[in-house]
Amino acid sequence: MRLLHLSDLHLGKRVHGFSIEEEQADMLGQIVRFVQEQAIDAVLIAGDVYDRAVPSEVAMVLLDRFLNTLASRSVPVYMISGNHDSAIRLQYGAALFAHAGIKIASTLQETVQTARVGDVELVMIPFLKPALVRPLFPDRTIETYADAMDAVLSTLKLEPGCKHIALVHQFIAGSKTCDSEQKSIGGLDEIPAETFKDFDYVALGHLHSFQKPAANMAYCGTLLKYSADEIRQRKRFVVLDVGETIQMETHDFHPLRDLVEIKGTYMELTDRSFYETLDLSNYYSIVLLDDHDIVNAHAKLQTIYPKILKLTYVNRPAPTGDFAPAAVEKLDPLTVIDAFYQSQNGRPVSEAQKRWIVGHWEESVCD
């Protein structure tokens, strides 16, 4: 049996103000063709189906066409919600969709939802956070995402004699993040890989680069590049061959338009000999090597490179110190809050205040 592991479609997303509807439509078309060519038996989607809790009409149409096409070809789809999805909205019509072979698990229940896919028991765990799990387990202390996942998994009794795959949208401790992913506070969302030791494979969503936090799990990553720091990432389809063991193989994905980085001085980048061989329909991250500002550089360069996602100077002196932009981006949000509080009040945030900040952050993010 062959399973396709996908995640983080982020349908409806705009990248630096640009609509990528055409690129996402092509992406979904490529998925359908890949499913046919590779004789895929079922598709697993590990969350962040939409980019926003209230998806655009364009995003909803894209998903509707995609799921309808797979259903018309009798390819089952198993899908969970991610932190960008509205659990209730994604769940709408789930009972009806199930008749077409599309199973959606987006809301937490007292017991974990499972599905039988050939010789595999698929455990479907929608995105969770402590605030969502606490009401289901009033007798347990649930402060972190790891506590929440432990509580949810405690209800699970794995079926003997078959393979077990978990569909999960969470941050696994030690994984690498990028700019297009939502930042957490104080490491609150980290879940140890050991939590899933009883599974043969964990199909992860949430992070945008392909990576294996442990031998029995993988983030498949996004198929499209959603930020400039994903430029050098190799985007790929992830296929699971399920037999006596579960073997993983990858296939390169080639987007309709790529995200490309170019470097040079303003004069070099505007010289016809430089850009005449480039595909100017691509999206560009431009690094200027001039040691001084070019007046209205973005607008001028955009006459040649219409889709500029990012423009930076590499040789220009940058702000320094603890609160230079580059330094702040690397800090944990709680560290930034604490530093600002100290600058305003002359004393650090107290432990009680930290607990309040962490609790309210966790409850409000992506609601």
Image: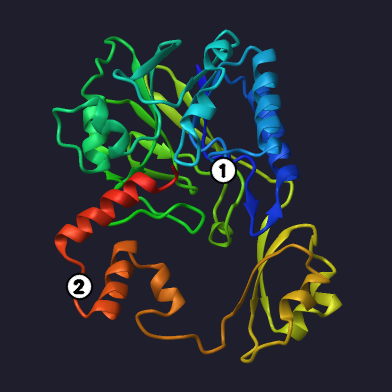
Colour scheme = rainbow
Q: Which mark is residue 51?
A: 1
- Left or right relative to 42: residue 28: right
- Residue 312 image point, x, y percent: 60, 76
Task: Say which of marks 1 and 2 sits in front.
Answer: 2
Q: Which residue lies under the disc numbered 2?
A: 348
| Amino acid type, label 2 | Pro
Q: Are marks 1 and 2 in contact (CB under 8 Å)?
A: no
- Name which residue lies at 61% across and 16% down: 75
Residue that sits furthest to the bottom in the current view = 292
Q: Kindly state the secondary structure of the residue where label 1 is placed.
A: loop
* Nearest to the observer: residue 354 or residue 322: 354
Quadrant where the image shows the C terminus? top left
Query: Looking at the rendering, which quadrant does residue 26 occupy?
Result: top right
Looking at the image, residue 179 lies above or below residue 12: below
- Residue 48 image point, x, y percent: 51, 38
* Nearest to the observer: residue 193 or residue 184: 184
Q: CA distance from mark 1 to mark 2?
A: 36 Å
